[in-house]
Image (cartoon, rainbow, N blue to C red):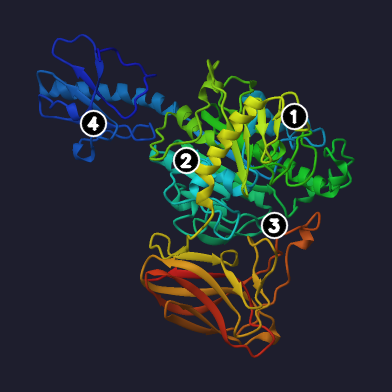
Amino acid sequence: MKDRLFQPTDIVRETAYAVRCCSGASKLQIRKLGVKNREPHPCGQDSLLELGRSGRESAPILDQSRFTSAAPVHRLNARLSGLEACRKLLFASFMLLSFSFVSLGQTRPNIVIILADDQGWGDLSVNGNSNLSTPNIDSLASTGAMFDRFYVCPVCSPTRAEFLTGRYHPRGGVRDVSRGGERLNLDERTIAEVFKAAGYATGAFGKWHNGTQWPYHPNARGFDEYFGFTSGHWGSYFNPPLDHNGTPVRGKGYITDDLTDHALQFIEKNKQRPFFCYVPYNTPHSPMQVPERFYQKFAKADLKLRSRDPKQEDVDFTRAALAMCENIDWNVGRILQRLDELKLAGNTIVIYFSDNGPNSWRWNGDMKGRKGSTDEGGVRSPFFIRWPGHIPAGTRVPQIAGAIDLLPTLADLAGVPVASQRPLDGVSLKPLLTGPAKDWPDRMIFSHWGGRVSARTQRYRLDNAGKLFDMEADPGQDRDVSKDQAEILARLSMAMNKWREEMLPSLKQDDRPFTVGYREFPLTQLPARDGVPHGRVQRSANAPNCSFFQNWTRPEDEITWDVQVASAGRYEAVVLYTCPQAEVGSTVELSFNGSRIEGVVSEANDPPLLGAQNDRVPRRGESYVKEFKPLRLGVIELKPGRGQLTLRALKVPGKQVMDVRAIHLTLVR
C-alpha cells in the first residue's frame, strides 16, 4: 500500500497502521501494515495505542506484551536521530491519532431493536388502521425506511431464534413454544455474541423465549445485562415476578413500562460506548391487561375497520389489543426521546418489528391468516429501520425481506464481522437501505410452523396445500393460479420440498435435557413448565408457560424433570409452593440418581389467584398465578450426569400435598 496522508474518516478494522517519520521527512505519513510485520523502533522504544474492538480509543500504553497478531492496534514507529526528538514526535502522533480515533469511534453505531409480541401488520396507524394512533412508531417510517413485505414466523420463539442467528429456526432446534422446545441450540452464534465480540455493551429487556437455564439463558448467549422473563408468556402484567441476570426479582408497575425503564437505564449507562439494546416486549400477547389510561379510549370504541370476516372478530379483545399497542407506542416514544436527549439519535440504528401476525381476528389489511398460520397474514410483520444520515428518510423498500436478514444487515451496517462458523440463511439488506440496489435478485423466503410450510417470492406465495397465489394481483389469497402458472408452481414446489427435506427431519425428536449446575450461574430454575406431571397431578392451565402443578393428592403421584447435572456438588433445594392451612403436614422427597432429601410442608401459604382482576377480556389459555412461597428442603449432593429429578410425597395426612410452581437448585459448593 502506498504511503498517504491519514484521514479521520479512514475505517480501521483488524489491521495495524504505522506512523512513520524518518529523518528529513517533511510530513507525517501513515501506511497500513500487518501486525506480524512490525519493525523494531531504531531507538528501542515502542509506543502503542490500542484501538479496542468497539472502535473507541483507550489510553496509550507501553506494554506490547498485551497485544497479539489478532488484536487491532496502531503502532507509532518514528525514526529520529535522537531519543528526545522521538518522544516529542510520538506525543504529537498520539494527539493526532486520538482525535482521529474519536471520529472513528463515532462511526460505529449504537443498535436498538424493539420487538412487539403478537402485534399484526395492521395494528399501526402508519399501515392504514384508523382505529388507533401510533405516532412514535410511525415516525420511524417517515424518518427512516419502511419495508412493505417483511416476513417472520407464525409464532413467537422461532422468530426470535431467526433474528438472533440469521438462520431458519429448525437449524437451531427451536420446535415449540414451551416445555423446552423453545430453546436455541448451544452451538448457534447469536447476534448479541457477534456485537459483544466487537466491543459493544449488550442488553436485553423483555420476553426472551429461547431458553431459561444456563447456558440457554440470555446472559449465556451474549447479553451482559438481562431483565425480563424467559418464558413464552406470563400470567400477570402488573408487578410480576421477573428475572434480573438470573436472579428472581419483583417488577414494578405495568410490565411494558418497567421493561422500558430498564432499557433506558442501560442506554444511559452505556452512552459513552457502543451499545446493542434488544427490547422484546411481551404485548399485545394475552392475557389482555393494560393500564386504565390507555384502555379508557377503547373501552366502548366504535371500531371502523374490522376483520375480513367480522363474524370471527371478538371486538372486546380487539379493543384491548389496540390499547396495548398504543401503550407500546408510548414506550417507543420514551426510547426515541431519551436518544434525542442524550444526543445519541444521530448515531443509533433503531429497528421496530413484530414476531408474528395478530393474535386474534381483527383488521389486518384483508390478508389471509393470523398468528399460527403460514399464510400472509400470519407471517407479514411491520418493519421500520432508522439511521439518520445513512438511511434516507422516507425510504420505502418493496423487496421482500425477513427476520433472518437482521443479523447480516446490522453487522454490515455497523462494520462488525459476523465470524459465524455456520452459513447464514439471511442476507444483508444494506444495499436496499443506503442506495439503489442494482440487480437485486428475486429470492424465496420460507415460513414454517408445526410441519406446515409456505414459500414466498417477490410476487408469489405457495401455501402448504400446494396452492399458488399471485400476491400482487390477489393480496388476500383468494384465487389459486397454480393451473395457469405451472412452471412457477413446479419451481416453488421443488424448492419447498428441498427446504422440507433439509430442515424438518431434525425437529422430529427433542432429546435435550434441562441443564443444571453451572458454577458461573449457580441458581437453576426448573419451572412447572419444564416438568412432567404423573398420576393425578395436573397443570393449572393447558398452556404450560406460566402454569403450576395442582391436584397432587397421593403418595403415588409425582412430578419429574429430565435434567443433566454439569457440576458435582452440594445444592440447596427449594420448592416454590402454596398449601392451605388444613392441608399442612405432608412429607415430600426430592431425588436424583440415588441422592435424596426430605422436607415437611409445615407452614401454610394460601394466597388467592391473581390475574382476573386486571384482565380486560377472559383469558383463553394462560394460567392465573399466585404468590408462591419457598419451601427449603435443605442441601442435596448431586453428581454429574443425566437423570430424572423426582418430587414425590412420602406422607399425605390431608386431602392434598401442595401446589408447585418451580424447583430451584443453587450450587453452593
Work out whether residue 363 or residue 533 is closer to the camera in this orientation and state it.
533
In the rendered image, the vertical position of residue 344 relative to residue 354, given as above or below: above
Res 238 label: 3
Looking at marks 4 and 2 on the same chain, the residue that comes earlier in the sequence is marked by 4
- Report how far apart the C-alphas of labels 4 and 1 lie in the structure: 60 Å
Q: Secondary structure at mark 3?
A: loop
Q: CA distance from mark 1 to mark 3?
A: 39 Å
**Structural distance between the alpha carbons of marks 1 and 2:** 33 Å
Report the side of 209 relative to 543 (left or right): left
Q: Which residue is mark 4?
A: 48
* Residue 191 image label: 2
Task: Answer with mark 4 or mark 1, whichever residue precedes in sequence.
Answer: 4
Image coords of residue 213 (percent x, y): 49, 60
Question: Residue 326: which disc?
Answer: none
Give the residue type that dot 4 points to. Answer: Leu
Depth check, mark 1 against mark 3: the one in front is 1
Q: Nearer the viewer, mark 4 or mark 2?
A: 2
The residue carrying mark 1 is 475
Q: Quadrant of residue 604?
A: bottom right
Which secondary structure lies at badge 2?
Answer: helix
Q: CA distance from mark 4 to mark 2?
A: 31 Å
Judge by depth and name the residue closer to the eye, 134 or 369. Answer: 369
Q: Residues within 10 Å of mark 2 (few under 14, many from 20)?
A: many
